[in-house]
Image (cartoon, rainbow, N blue to C red):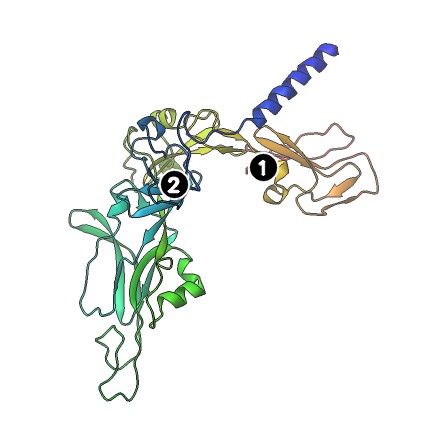
């Protein structure tokens, strides 16, 4: 019995030590932040070993008393946030794609070279915003020489006599003053233009918008391509699950964490932590166990919670029964002796007999 107790004590100490070790963000010896922005590998700046090829950023600390700025590409995009989980980068772009007080002819404007040339694509979390009168804007994607596809379109109409103009004007007889909206075209993160104060400032005809109002958030999608096998040319009838599968070589090279998965997308390959883990799947030991018991609202455990490696157990306390996934869902039982238990982790659903009298479900759910 003494030997068994000693073994248990050692295991508990090792588990506690592992849980206390912070998950790595970047490679050893590399900076992992610029200003107030976290820079997780495969992104990085400085030495070449600090980033995956094609994911080098610039930390600009020449802006005087202001915090350093994290720059992507040619310098026109400032990085605000990097997400490994959603494979997106939130950037800030200054100004409108096209603007003018008097637009009377069709125009084509190139947009996206500042990020598409570096392997990024527009995320579906963006929207096309157009202001003005009698205007039509179309956002197209370059699909190769002489080919393009429409991503989005937007039209803006105003009711006034002279329909040829898009400006602020006044009739010659001064009988009434006609005011026309400023013409802007933005590609912005969805919801940005919904801010009432921002919209009022941009559409004001009395004064030009401030520099802050013209800082437009943009969401970019990314994936790793360089140094990995070419993405397969899937047949038309290929399922989404098949399209997401990674070649073994891509997984071995890219996803270093033992608890990681590899997925393929339109922009390249990406790694994710397995269910029950979080962190950086691109680094060894980067995915670490989530303590679901510390997040009852997120994981729906309002009874007694026991964290385990990669999953957790939830149960109504002894002498109670009910739904432990709801606040106050466990109520006092008339008879005592049984506990309702649930074990939640990644895997198939099983039913097991509990050690108490009677038959109680131990349910394993996919997260």
Residue occupying the point 63% across, 18% down:
11
Occupied quadrant, residue 17: top right
Q: Is residue 66 left or right of residue 96?
A: right
Quadrant for the C terminus in the image? top right
Q: Position of residue 302 (x, y in %)?
A: 68, 42
114 in relation to 287, above or below: below
Residue 345 x %, y %: 58, 33
User: Is residue 166 among the parts visible in the rendering?
Assistant: yes
Q: Could you classify mark 1 by the number of other residues whose Cα lies within 10 Å: few (under 14), some (14-19), or many (20 or more)?
A: some
Rendered view: 11 above or below 331:
above
Q: Residue at x 25, y 72 (%)?
A: 166
Q: Quadrant of residue 333?
A: top right
Which residue does the numbered mark 2 point to in the structure image?
Answer: 240
> Toward the viewer: 145 or 26?
26
| Mark 2–mark 1 distance (CA, rounded to whole Å) | 23 Å
Q: Is residue 25 left or right of residue 248?
A: right
Label annotation for residue 234: none
Instruction: Please name whichever residue, 112 or 314, is drawn nearer the observer in this view of the structure.
Output: 112
**Residue occupying the point 71% across, 10% down:** 3
Do callouts 2 and 1 mark residues in contact (Cβ within 8 Å)?
A: no
Q: Return the residue nearer the eye: 303 or 105.
A: 105
Badge 2 crowding class, 10 Å Cα cut-off, few under 14, some 14 to 19, many 20 or more, is few
Residue 353: give x, y in percent of width and height: 70, 29
Residue lying at the far front in this picture: please name it.
65
């Amino acid at each position: 019995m003494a030997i068994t107790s000693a073994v248990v004590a050692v295991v508990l100490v090792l588990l506690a030590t592992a849980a206390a070790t912070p998950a790595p963000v970047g490679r050893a010896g590399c900076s992992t932040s610029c200003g107030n922005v976290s820079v997780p590998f495969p992104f990085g700046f400085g030495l070449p070993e600090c980033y995956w090829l094609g994911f080098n950023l610039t930390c600009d600390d020449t802006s005087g008393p202001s915090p350093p700025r994290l720059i992507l590409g040619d310098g026109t995009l400032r990085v605000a946030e990097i997400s490994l989980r959603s494979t997106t980068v939130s950037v800030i772009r200054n100004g409108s794609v096209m603007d003018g007080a008097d637009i009377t002819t069709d125009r084509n404007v190139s947009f996206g070279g500042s990020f598409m040339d570096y392997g990024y694509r527009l995320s579906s979390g963006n929207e096309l915003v157009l202001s003005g009168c009698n205007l039509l804007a179309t956002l197209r994607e370059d699909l190769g020489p002489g080919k393009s596809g429409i991503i989005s379109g937007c039209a803006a109409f105003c009711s006034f006599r002279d329909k040829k103009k898009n400006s602020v004007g006044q009739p010659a007889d001064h009988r009434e003053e006609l005011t026309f909206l400023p013409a802007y075209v933005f590609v912005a993160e969805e919801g940005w233009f919904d801010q009432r104060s921002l919209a009022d400032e941009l559409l004001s005809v009395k004064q030009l918008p401030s520099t802050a109002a013209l800082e437009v958030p943009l969401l970019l999608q990314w994936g790793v391509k360089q140094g990995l096998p070419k993405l397969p040319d899937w047949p038309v009838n290929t399922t989404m699950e098949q399209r997401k599968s990674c070649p073994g070589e891509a997984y071995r090279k890219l996803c270093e964490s033992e608890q990681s998965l590899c997925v393929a997308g339109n922009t390249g390959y990406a790694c994710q932590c397995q269910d029950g883990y979080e962190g950086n799947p691109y680094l060894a030991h980067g995915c670490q166990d989530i303590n679901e018991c510390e997040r009852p609202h997120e994981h729906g455990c309002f009874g007694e919670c026991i964290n385990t490696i990669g999953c957790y157990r939830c149960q109504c306390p002894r002498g109670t029964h009910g739904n432990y996934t709801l606040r106050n869902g466990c109520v006092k039982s008339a008879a005592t002796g049984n506990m309702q238990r649930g074990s939640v982790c990644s895997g198939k659903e099983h039913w097991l007999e509990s050690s108490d009298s009677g038959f109680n479900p131990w349910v394993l759910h996919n997260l």
